[in-house]
Amino acid sequence: MDDTRFSQGLQVRKDVLGAAYVEKSLENATDFAREFQELLTEYCWGAVWGDETLDRKTRSMLNVAMLAALNRMDEWEIHFRGAIKNGVSAAELKAILNQVAIYCGVPVSVECHRIAKKVFDDLDQN
């Protein structure tokens, strides 16, 4: 493991997803999953998200679209929250979901809207 890339990835991961979520993921990792969590942190968050060619807002927009296309709703919700944190506006998110509806299908966009409502409701309560 590259300690520098892991440290950078850990910081980026916490910045985007929230420190509490990341720390819980790492703390709850079993012996079986621990190496995978380290791999994610080093390569996904350190190497890819740490590459400054694309800014975080753009990466969040890409992830929201790609995760919707793959119908990975648990990850989609996490990255939807991260997108808001990274400055993606409600109008931009709505436009992304309209595009998802056309290119990936209405049912997945309906599910994304359901989750988005939950996230926005959560944010309004805090």
Image (cartoon, helix red, strand yellow):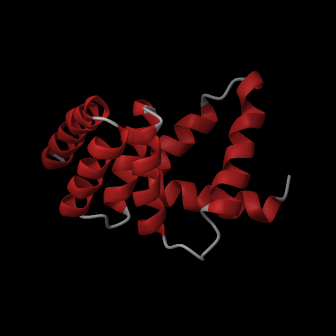
Relative to residue 27, is residue 17 depicted above or below? below
- 78 or 60, which is in the foreground? 60
Residue at x 63%, y 67% (from the top left corner): 50
In the image, farthest residue toward the right = 1
- 11 or 87, which is in the foreground? 87
Residue 32, position as x, y percentages in the image: 76, 22
Place residue 60 in its image quadrant: bottom left
Residue 51, position as x, y percentages in the image: 64, 71
Place residue 121 in its image quadrant: top left
Position of residue 60 in the picture relative to residue 4 (left or right): left
Residue at x 74%, y 57% (from the top left corner): 6
Q: Count the marks: how many? A: 0
Q: Is residue 18 visible?
A: no
Residue at x 40%, y 32% (from the top left corner): 73
Place residue 36 in its image quadrant: top right
Q: Is residue 79 visible?
A: yes
Residue 62, position as x, y percentages in the image: 45, 57
In the image, farthest residue toward the front = 102
Residue 77, position as x, y percentages in the image: 36, 39
Residue at x 65%, y 61% (from the top left corner): 48
In the image, farthest residue toward the bottom = 53
